[in-house]
Image (cartoon, rainbow, N blue to C red):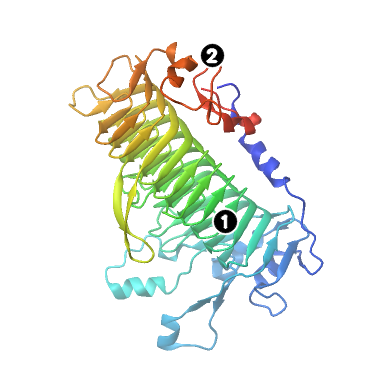
Amino acid sequence: MRTSFMKKIAKLGIIILFAFPFSLWSDAIPLLTIEQVQKIGIDPDYPLDGNYILMQDIDAFQTRYWNNGRGFRPIGLREFTGVTGWVRSKFDYKYQPFEGVFDGNGHKIVNLYMNNLIGKGVLPSTKREFESLISKLYPLGLFYEISQRGCVKNLILENIYIYGCFCDICVVTRFNFGKIENVHVWGELDGSGNFQNTCGLAVQNFGEIRNCSLTCEKFYVYNLGGLVHSNKGLIEHSFFSGCIFGTYGGGYIEGMGGLVSVNNDKGIIKDCFSDVQIRGGSVLGGLVGKNFGTISRSYSVVNAWGEQSVGGLIGINLGEVKECFATGEVRGMTKIGGLAGENTKAIFANENKNQVETYGILEDCFFTGDVKGNDVIGGLVGVNDTSVCNCYCIGVLTKREYIKILNGELVGNNKGNVENCVWELNSSGFILPSTGVGKSPLEMKEKCTFVSLGWDFEKIWKIEEGNTYPYFTWLENYPNFLYIP
């Protein structure tokens, strides 16, 4: 590691924040107070398709006393008035998307408070009790939905406090069909008693998220994506930094990731990273829990501890991953890998309800660090059923000595294709049966070792002969955060 980018993560937000000029809207509606922000979509003078601009930092501390202690109400959430009885119980709230522009103008909203803990500690025993509880709740976030025409940008949300149970929890929006750009969040989210989705920016992203970040020292969740739960759009130049504590032993079958829970078949993640300490159950990844889509030029600095299908970058990969890496420590019980817990295939129904078969591909990737587990562990991948190409791993592989298990310096259990891959000899103190080629530490720092396998050292890889292991050319675009193994 030539420079410690982990100590400089805070600077990235500042660099991104001022990367674009402030918008100058001649027809913009100025916002000076949190009361004016709350009027959007409620007051006729503050329409949902308006152009808004923050004129100063806003302290929203008073929101903790609003709405009978529930705090700020999501923009686009309208309560019915004059409606009672059965109709009200079924249609208690009406949601409308935000279709305008919300320009933070580089300013902050601080101390925003939202609380839907009315259901915390309550375990409904009947369907009627559950429906009664749900009727009193609503999703939490600054906006309920951002439409295709909507845009939220140039905004800092600081010291945000969001607590919820039996409801989706996010900071910016439940659904994003539009654009979220240059939005940075610092705060505390508590979804520890929640049985829905908890995430930083958007529960579901169908649009574009660019140059955004979430820095969160305490993130308590049941099921989570650091920025997004379900991504079906684009996430670019964004990151998560902090600690995630999931419900141990439960996790979430869809996935739990430092950046995204589930990257769907149309989801694209590129030029993103996470610096995360993550604890949870199954399908756990430093960057993404489960991937069906594409991930490129991204990485994770990780300390992950889970149960099954745990990876430094991805828990389960069923999509395409290229030019990515993870570094750190990965621990678990079974199907544990430095980069991915599982690289596999599956058949699923797409949005048109057609049966689609998807294959996991890991190409031009690497992992450096330690992998510890009980059963089926690999320095790069725990289980591979599909394709791993032009990858390497270095580090320490540790197992329980008394358990007879499938292990490998590169892949723990290989049922697919592994081509042109390398692992460092004696990195674990003992050699385990493995796919790939074992090389000495000296050979791992020689260009000829990898050129002989057909690796591309013009467009993809670089190496400083005798001094470094191979690293990516794209890392040179980020000199302040450069990682060289």
Residue 92 horizontal/vertical position (percent): 47, 79
Going by the image, does 105 lie left or right of 165?
right
**Between residues 421 and 139, which one lies in front from this camera angle?**
421
Residue 97 horizontal/vertical position (percent): 57, 71
Q: Nearer the viewer, mark 2 or mark 1?
A: 2
> Looking at the image, can residue 6 be seen?
no
Number of callouts: 2
Residue 357 horizontal/vertical position (percent): 31, 53
Q: Amino acid at mark 1?
A: Glu
Q: Amino acid at mark 2?
A: Glu
Going by the image, does 451 lie left or right of 315?
right
- Secondary structure under tag 2 reads loop
Please tell me which of labels 2 and 1 falls first in the chain: 1
**Between residues 132 and 226, which one lies in front from this camera angle?**
226
Residue receiving disc 1: 208
Residue receiving disc 2: 465
Q: Which mark is residue 104?
A: none
Q: Which residue lies at the image location 43% right of the left edge and 86% below the top edge?
A: 87
**Between residues 172 and 220, which one lies in front from this camera angle?**
172
